[in-house]
């Protein structure tokens, strides 16, 4: 039986973000309280000031660089059985942890637990744009609890793209192992991690309830990677894990087009 004492929000902070304090407040406002720790590879006065204001510890990654290195450092440094890698720009609804713990305690041998999500665009919460609707549709099989432990169903869900929002995920460390994120991907390292974990015996516990919001803005790493075409290359690499090359090339065209809604254009 997992409790809040088994959980840590590992908040990854990078450079100076005007949204960091808002994210911290959403974690402190959880209806079920747990541990909150800040991890960074770019220590600065802004991060230090936020941490001191709210009495949070900060740990600096001096090892492997890159997004994967930062996430693995945060993940490996936590001392609890459960960890949620929170991103500095995002917001969590007050009942996020409460519902995630409920999912974990209902699941058989949980590997990860995750939720639906919305987007923050220009300070407004968006739940029904085209991309979000497609991702909810992709995850429909996991609305059925029986399918949580099915490797076949999990892999079919992931074979069409990555509908799982990384900061919505809570990882069970004894099932996910050490350093679950590979640093050879810049954008799809979370998709690659879920693909690997989809072959592990256990459950992907899921609720469609949107319990957090992922912020979309022009300075985000995701937007930068899409605009730089890096994501298309990584998407093709991921599709090849599920499909023959000729099918993978067809799928990546449609998936890359859908990612364009990460720009400020697709708000409805």
Image: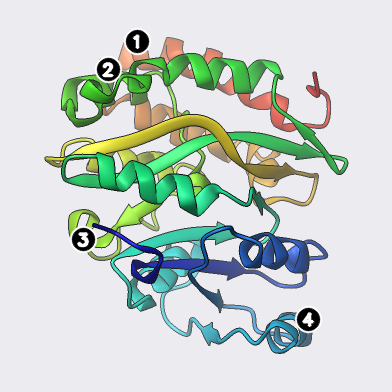
The local crowd at label 3, few if under 14, some if 14 to 19, many if 20 or more residues have their Cα within 10 Å, is few
Labelled pair 1, 2 in contact (Cβ < 8 Å): yes
Q: Position of residue 135 (x, y in %)?
A: 52, 21
Labelled pair 3, 2 in contact (Cβ < 8 Å): no
The residue beneath circle 4 is 46
The local crowd at label 4, few if under 14, some if 14 to 19, many if 20 or more residues have their Cα within 10 Å, is some
Provide the secondary structure element on which disc 2 rests. loop
**As rendered, which of 100 and 260 lies closer to the eye?**
100
Provide the secondary structure element on which disc 1 rests. helix
Judge left or right: residue 256 versus residue 78. right
Could you tell me how far apart the alpha carbons at marks 1 and 4 are, in whole angstroms? Answer: 47 Å
Return the disc, 1 or 3, that comes first in the chain's sequence.
3
The residue beneath circle 3 is 177
Camera sees residue 242: no
Which residue is pictured at 47% across the width and 28% down the height? 163
Foreground disc of the pair 1, 4: 4
The residue beneath circle 1 is 247
**As rendered, which of 23 and 165 lies closer to the eye?**
23
Provide the secondary structure element on which disc 3 rests. loop
Return the disc, 1 or 4, that comes first in the chain's sequence.
4
The residue beneath circle 2 is 243
Labelled pair 1, 4 in contact (Cβ < 8 Å): no
Q: Is residue 216 above or below residue 149?
A: below
């Amino acid at each position: 039986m997992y409790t809040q004492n088994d959980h840590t929000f590992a908040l990854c902070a990078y450079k100076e973000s005007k949204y960091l304090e808002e994210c911290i407040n959403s974690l402190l406002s959880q209806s079920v309280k747990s541990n909150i720790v800040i991890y960074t590879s770019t220590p600065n006065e802004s991060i230090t000031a936020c941490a001191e204001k709210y009495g949070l510890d900060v740990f600096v990654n001096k090892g492997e660089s890159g997004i994967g290195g930062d996430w693995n450092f945060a993940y490996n440094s936590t001392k609890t059985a459960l960890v949620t890698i929170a991103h500095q720009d995002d917001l969590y609804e007050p009942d996020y942890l409460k519902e995630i713990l409920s999912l974990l305690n209902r699941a058989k041998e949980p590997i990860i637990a995750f939720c639906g999500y919305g987007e923050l665009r220009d300070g407004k919460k968006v739940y029904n744009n085209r991309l979000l609707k497609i991702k909810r549709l992709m995850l429909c099989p996991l609305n059925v609890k029986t399918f949580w432990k099915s490797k076949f169903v999990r892999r079919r869900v992931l074979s069409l793209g990555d509908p799982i929002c990384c900061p919505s995920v809570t990882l069970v460390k004894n099932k996910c192992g050490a350093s679950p994120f590979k640093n050879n991907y810049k954008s799809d390292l979370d998709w690659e991690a879920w693909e690997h974990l989809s072959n592990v015996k256990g459950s992907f516990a899921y609720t469609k309830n949107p319990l957090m919001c992922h912020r979309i803005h022009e300075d985000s790493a995701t937007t930068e990677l899409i605009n730089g075409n890096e994501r298309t290359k990584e998407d093709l690499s991921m599709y090849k894990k599920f499909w023959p090359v000729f099918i993978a090339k067809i799928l990546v065209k449609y998936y890359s087009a859908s990612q364009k809604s990460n720009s400020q254009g697709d708000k409805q």
